[in-house]
Amino acid sequence: MLISRAPVRISFFGGGTDYPEYFIKHGGAVLATAIDKFSYVTVSPFLSHLFDYSIRVSYRQVELVRKVEEIEHKVYRECLKFCGLDKDIEVHNVADLPAFTGLGSSSAFTVSLLHALHSFKGEFLKPLELAYEAIYVERHLVKDKVGCQDQVLAAVGGFNLVEFRTEDHITVSRVPISPQRLQEFEQHLFIVFTGIRRKAANVVEKQLQKVGDNTDILKEMRYMVDDGWDILTGNRPLAEFGALMHRAWLAKRSLECGISNPEIDKIYDMGIKAGAWGGKLLGAGAGGFMLFFAPIDLHKNLQQIFINHQILNVKLDAPSSQIIFS
C-alpha cells in the first residue's frame, strides 16, 4: 500500500485569469498559497482472480467493477485509463475538507490520485509535470470547466505567484517572505463557511461566456496580483493587503451576477462592519468559504459574530503533493 496527499489552496488575487479562455490571449496570474488541509489517496494491489471484480474504488460510494470503463466516477475512471491501469488495483480517497467549498479540493484529489497511481507504477513526475497532467485530465478527459491554479498549488505547494501563458507553460515564483512576516500575515486571516456548497464548473460556465465583455476587469484583477506581491514582500502595512482584497472582491462579483447572492453579501457585510479591512469569497463564487483579512485584536469579535458558522483555522505555505507512506 502507498498513501499520497495533496493540499488545497487559498487564492488571494487573480482568480478568474487562470482560465485558458482568458490567459491564452492576455496572460493570467494568481497570488495563492497551499494550506494544511489535504486530499489523501491510498493505492494497493489485490488478487482480482479471487474476486468477482477487477478494480475497487471508494469515495462517498464504493464501486466494484470488472473493467475500468465501468467506473462511474469520472476522475477515477480517466486517471486509471490515463495511467494504463485496468485491473488488480484498489484505490481509496479521504479528505480533510468536503468538496465544492471553494478551496480547490477537486483538483487536489486529481493531483493526489495521479501522484499515487504513477508511484504505484514506479514512475516519478516533477511537481509541474504532475500539475500539467492534472490540468489535462480535468479539462480534456473529464471535460470540466475548470481553471489551472488549483492543480498547480496542489502539485507544487507553497506560497506563490503563478503565471499562466498556456496550459503547459506555467511559471511558479515563490513569495520571498520571512517566517516572521508570514506568521504575522497568517494571523490576520479569518475564514468562515457560508454553509453553501456548489460545483465550481457550474458557477464558472456563465463567467466564461462573458470573458470578452469582462476583459478590462480581468486585466485589473491580474494587476492586483503584482500589488499584493509588493505589499507582502515590502514594508507596506498589511492593512493595505486587506483593502486590496476588498477591491478584488468588488471586481470579482461584478463579473457575473451569480458569483454572489444576498446571503453571501450579508456575511461579507457582517465581517466588514466588524472591522475587517477586506475579504473575498474563495473559489469560483456562489458559496464555499469566505475569507476576511482583519486586525488580529478583532478576531474574537468576529468569532462571536459568526458563532453559528463553521470557522476554519489554517496554516499557510503547505508542502507539495507527496507520498507519505509506501
Image (cartoon, grey):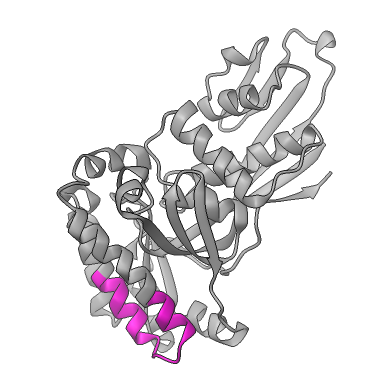
Residue 67: give x, y in percent of width and height: 65, 11
Residue 106 on the magenta segment? no
The residue shown at (85%, 17%) is 47
The stretch in magenta equals 228-247
Specify the quadrant that holds the N terminus.
top right
Give the percent coordinates (x, y) of residue 82: 62, 26
Q: Is residue 68 left or right of residue 323?
A: left
* Viewer-proximal residue among 291 and 123: 123
Please, is residue 265 above or below residue 127 in the view? below
Residue 308, position in %: x, y?
Answer: 37, 63
Q: Which residue is drawn at 52% across and 85% down?
A: 184
| Residue 239 in sight | yes
- The one nearer the camera, 51 or 207, is 207
Predominant SS along the magenta part: helix
Number of dots carrying numbers: 0
Q: In this view, does 44 lie to the left or right of 115?
A: right
* Magenta-drawn stretch contains 231: yes
Question: Can residue 306 be seen here?
Answer: no
Q: Which residue is drawn at the image coordinates 35% and 86% (left, top)?
A: 239
Residue at (35% x, 38% y) in the render = 201
Residue 181 point in image, percent of width and height: 54, 85
Quadrant, the C terminus: top right
Which residue is nearer to you in this view: 274 or 155?
155
User: In terms of image quadrants, where is residue 218?
Assistant: bottom left
Q: In the figure, 253 relative to 166: above or below? A: below
Residue 97 sits above or below residue 274 on the image: above
